Amino acid sequence: YGIYHLVNDGAVSWWDALVTLFRCMGRDVVVHKVRGSMFTRKAKRPAYSALASTKRPPLRSLHEALREYATTLENVSKRI
């Protein structure tokens, strides 16, 4: 009952996820890291936070999911 957050296994930053996705796609792209504190926001943000999936069985790793997503994007783009 209620709202569940469901995420893949493993905690990564947005930067790490994006770099991993580009690598899986075979793209040589430079992604610069920036701190969240560099952006003005009305709500205060914690220095570190990660979603946890504790109410459901664990999902596969985020890196495995990103590899599959990259393959799917590649296949779709070939059909366009």
Image (tube, rainbow, N blue to C red):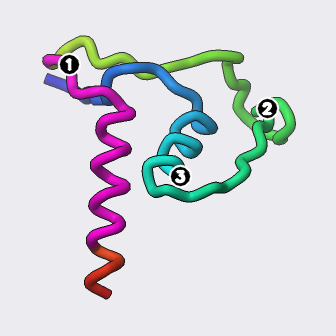
How far apart, in angstroms, are the residues tagged by discs 1 and 2?
29 Å
On screen, 6 above or below 53? below
Q: Earlier in the sequence, mark 2 or mark 3?
A: 3
Q: Earlier in the sequence, mark 1 or mark 2?
A: 2
Q: Residues within 10 Å of mark 2 (few under 14, many from 20)?
A: few
Image quadrant for the N terminus?
top left
How far apart, in angstroms, are the residues tagged by discs 2 and 3?
20 Å
Picture coordinates of residue 58 (x, y %)? 20, 19
Picture coordinates of residue 12 (x, y %)? 52, 26
Do residues under tags 1 and 3 come within 8 Å of each other at their CB atoms? no
Name the amino acid, label 1.
Answer: Pro
**Chain part drawn in magenta:** 57-75
Picture coordinates of residue 30 (x, y %)? 73, 51
Residue at 69% x, 24% y: name it: 45
Residue nearer the viewer, 34 or 80: 80
Q: Residues within 10 Å of mark 1 (few under 14, many from 20)?
A: some
Front label number (2 vs 3): 3
Q: Earlier in the sequence, mark 1 or mark 3?
A: 3
Image quadrant for the C terminus?
bottom left
Q: Secondary structure at mark 1?
A: loop
- Which residue is denoted by mark 3 in the rendering? 22
Name the amino acid, label 2.
Answer: Arg
Q: Is residue 36 left or right of residue 23?
A: right
- Which residue is denoted by mark 1 in the rendering? 58
